[in-house]
Each structure stands twice: as structure tokens, then as C-alpha cells.
Amino acid sequence: MAKRGLRPAEITHFLQNIDEDNSEGEPLHSSDEEWQQLPTNSDLSSSDDENSANQVQDLPGEEITIATSNDGNATRQYRGIKRTRNRGGSRSRGRGRSQPLLRLLDTYNSLKEIPLETEITAPDGTNWKVATTNCALPGRRGQQNLFKDQAGPTPYAKRNVDETCSSAWRLMIDDKILKQVLSCTIAEARRTHSPDWVITIVELDAFLAIIYVRGAIGAKCLDLDALWSVKWGNDFVKATMSQDRFREIMKFLRFDVRSTRTQRLTNDKFGLISDVWYNFISNAQSCYTPGPYITIDEQLFPSKCRCRFTQFMSSKPDKYGQKFWLAVDKDSKYIVNAFPYLGKDDVRSNDERLGDYVVKKLMQPYLKKGRNITCDNFFTSLSLAETLKSNGTSIVGTINKARREIPVCVKEAKKSCTVQWY
């Protein structure tokens, strides 16, 4: 059976009833009012506060505030001086949680309370001023917080979409994209297979339909033979196209002109499909206008194929793949802009952070409309916030402690705090 520790009240009772003969200290005189009775828990806290306040009067720049903890006891908080020595009362041991006599918060481990209007200088020389949070500033709202657009499908999309799903799909994958894929595929087949090989737009649509169905029924991991199986195959797939024709189109499928590939790859690692991809993104932007909130992050598409820009990310479930930067509308989950990460980019200057470059490129079509960006600490920075504010856009995101523009007191704070740019 575990031993139970003494409660504070029991300790006080035993100390008050110790005989002078059993005490190793000096005898107590009953005539002295100061030592007639050992102070209780509340008396000890108040008297210790007075003594401590007198002791720290000679310490310049220190301020003391009295707060109330969750357990109802007074706690003392110091600001302005680091303390390396443990001070204050102790916590008794035993079953359950006991009430502390006195608890002192060390400034090195607690959130520093800084008076309002105090100016703080960050390591890089940026000056900050402490202000109240969660309160509206007087005056008109900033231009970066006034949404000036109408979210939803564009008039172009509304005019061209009818009751069929194919009409909406054709707005994303239009005739321009299909004709380019068609011509590149025919050129590759005639170069390697037969000079009179041909494919039509209808066949290409049927080929893409089978790929969609394969993903919709969860058969992407199955062998192609299973889709055309006499007993277990899919009726839609078998009625759309023969297996041999499907494999033949898959073999010759191309998205770029091979004769100019070498020259294009010297300047664009994404050259094999860049024309098709950016036409698709342009169609997506022309069909939908995002709302006031856009989220930006990275997306790894898993793949282990031979590729010039395959990335390894140990934090992802699938370690290898092609990484894309995405800007997505918060309400509809609609991709409004995206481009791949291809490694070092000659367009980006050496003194520009990658996160700043990515956000500015993704948000280029949607600036000066009062939108808000939400991102993680890889992107958030003071320089990016200032650039977006000058373009009528605001930003919300977590902050990396490694940023030199962040004050040291904010980095050392263990509790959550908010840094706002106005």
C-alpha cells in the first residue's frame, strides 16, 4: 500500500504543536506577536509576496503582477529579469492533486507579458509594436480585406454547359488540348510503327473514358486483362474499345512534338507535357472565379518512374513522386492555379525565398481583389505579407521560428501568440 503524503493543513497543525523541548531551533516567545502562530496558506502567500516585493525593489526594470491560477491560488509573474534559481513554495505529494502554497513563474519558461505600445526590435532590425489583439481598429477597413469579385462559375462556363456532363468536361479538356495530343500521338506511331497509322477524336475520347472508368471503379491496380475478362470484365469497357486497340493507343500516346523535344528540355524540364498542362490550367481559370479565401500548399503525386523532377519527401506516405504547388479555393476545393516544382529555377532571383516566389506566382491572376491566403510556415514571411498587402491581398499562416524578422520574445513563448501585420 502506497504511503500518503501529508496535506498542507496537516503539516501546519503538526508544526504549531511542536514542543520547545523537541525543537532544534530557538524557543518561541509567546509575547512576540509576530511568532504567536504559524501563518496559514493564504497568510503565507500574502506575506511572502510582500517580502518578495521588498526584495526586488532594488532590481531595475522588473515588474510584478499578481494573477489567479485555475486552482484559485495567487501566482506571481516576473517580467524583465531571468531567474535561474527555483523560488516559492512546494507541492505536496500523495493521491490526487494537491493545492500549491505558492507558485512562481520563471520568465525564461513562461510567456512574456509585454506592456502595450512597447517597441521591440527583431534580430534583422525589424521594429515591432505591441498592440491589443482581437479588436477592430478604428477607421475604414484596408483594401486587402475588401473582396471585390464575384465567386462561382464564370459567364463563359454558364453559356457553354448544358445538361450533359461531357459539356462541362469539354470546357476543361477542350479541342485545342485534344488536337495536340492527337497530332503528337499520330506522329509517334507513324515514326515507330506504320506510316499510315491514324486515330480520330472519337477514339481518343473513348480511350480517355476507359481511363476514367478504371479509376472510378477502383481498378487502377488491376491488370488490364481483368477489365476485358469474359466472366469478370466491365461491360462498359468491353463495349467501348477492344483491348488490343487500347494498348496500341497507350503505347503511342504522346503530348509533345518529339523533333523539338531536346531543345525544349534544355530550358523546361516539364517540356514533355507543359503545353497541355498550362492549357488545362488556363481553362480551369476561365471557367471558375474563386471566393475570398484561397489555400496554398504542396501536393506530391506518387510515382517512381524515370523523371527529371522526381522528388523524395520522407514526411509523405508515398516517398517518391512529382511535387506540385497548388492554389485551391477554400469553399469549393477547386484548383485555381498549379505548377510543378522542377528544382532550381533561373527565373527566381537568388535573394528571393522559394515560398515567396511560389505564392506570388500562384496568386498572380487573383491579386488586388481583397482575397485572403492561408498557408503554412514554409510560405509565411514578413516580406511576403508586405508584398501581398501592397497588391490588395492579405495572408494568414503559421510562422517558422527561424525567421529573423520575428522578435526573440515571440520565439521563446511556449503559449500561442498572434503576430499581425497592418
Image (cartoon, helix red, strand yellow):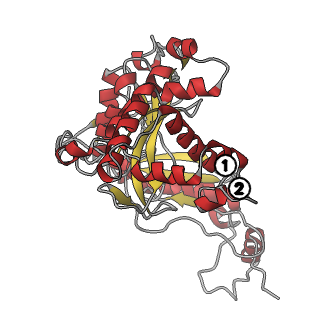
Which quadrant is home to the N terminus? Answer: bottom right
- Residue at 61% from the left image edge and 69% from the top image edge: 90
Residue 216: tell me if it is visible.
no
Q: Which residue is mark 2?
A: 233
- Report the side of 311 relative to 207 (left or right): left
Q: Nearer the viewer, residue 76 or 379?
A: 379
Q: Which mark identifies residue 238?
A: 1
Left or right, 92 with respect to 67, comes to right
Disc 1 crowd rating (10 Å Cα; few below 14, some 14-19, many 20+) is some
Q: Position of residue 111 (x, y in %)?
A: 47, 50
Labels 2 & 1 near each other (Cβ < 8 A): yes
Please tell me in which quadrant of the rendered image residue 2 appears.
Answer: bottom right
Q: Residues within 10 Å of mark 2 (few under 14, many from 20)?
A: some
In the rendered image of this protein, does residue 278 appear above or below residue 306?
above
The image shows residue 319 at horizontal and vertical percentages of: 45, 63
Q: Residue at x 53, y 59 (%)?
A: 104
Element at label 1: helix
